[in-house]
Image (tube, grey):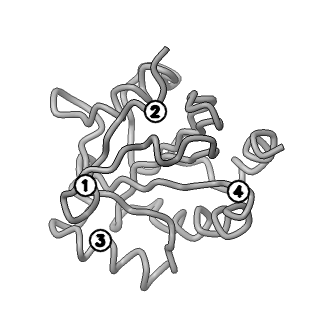
Amino acid sequence: MKTIYDFQVKLPNGEEKSLQEYEGRPLIIVNTASKCGFTPQFKGLQTLYDTYKDHGLEILGFPCSQFNNQEYDQIEKTTEFCQVNYGVTFPIFAKVEVNGSNADPLFKFLKEQKTGILSSRIKWNFTKFLVNRDGQVMKRYAPAIDPSSIQADLVKLLS
């Protein structure tokens, strides 16, 4: 059975990284945008990360411009924006597409594992996927769901 550990993702500098490096850790994988109404969720995501990183949590942010072009063109501006405005210390990867024929393979997999209410298509920025320690996608959260609302499900994966 395929897991998220079977995928490679791109770092901001273009190098590839295997998600196998996160094996055994619960993950929150999220498509992000710096100029979106949900951008303040970076603060909530960082709070979860600060609270649970010592228990193994990793949050993986993937900038995306597919929704009203709400991400900077240069990845350096994106990472700087996240660090300066929200104190983000969890990994931000290279910009991806999450829908369509050019969708990143990881996001194709995530959507296949957990569909949305009406379809598998990601509707907007800050769709969040909770992944267990075995690399299985456990839950999908709509963009409007505040990161603090994930905490109860996350704590179950940490124990």
Residue 109: where, in percent of width, then height?
39, 25
Q: Nearer the viewer, residue 27 or 47?
A: 27
* Amino acid carrying mark 3 in the image: Thr
**Secondary structure at numbered mark 4:** helix
Within 10 Å of disc 3 (Cα), the crowding (few <14, some 14-19, many 20+) is: many
The residue identified by callout 3 is 78
Within 10 Å of disc 1 (Cα), the crowding (few <14, some 14-19, many 20+) is: many
Which quadrant of the figure contains the C terminus?
A: top right
Sequence-first tag of 4 and 2? 2
Q: Which mark is residue 95?
A: 1
- Residues tagged 3 and 1 counted as in contact (Cβ below 8 A): yes
Give left or right: position of 139 versus 123.
right
Judged by depth in the image, the label closer to the viewer, 3 or 4, is 3
Judged by depth in the image, the label closer to the viewer, 4 or 2, is 2
Judged by depth in the image, the label closer to the viewer, 3 or 2, is 2
The residue identified by callout 4 is 148
Q: Is residue 2 above or below residue 98?
A: above
The residue identified by callout 2 is 4
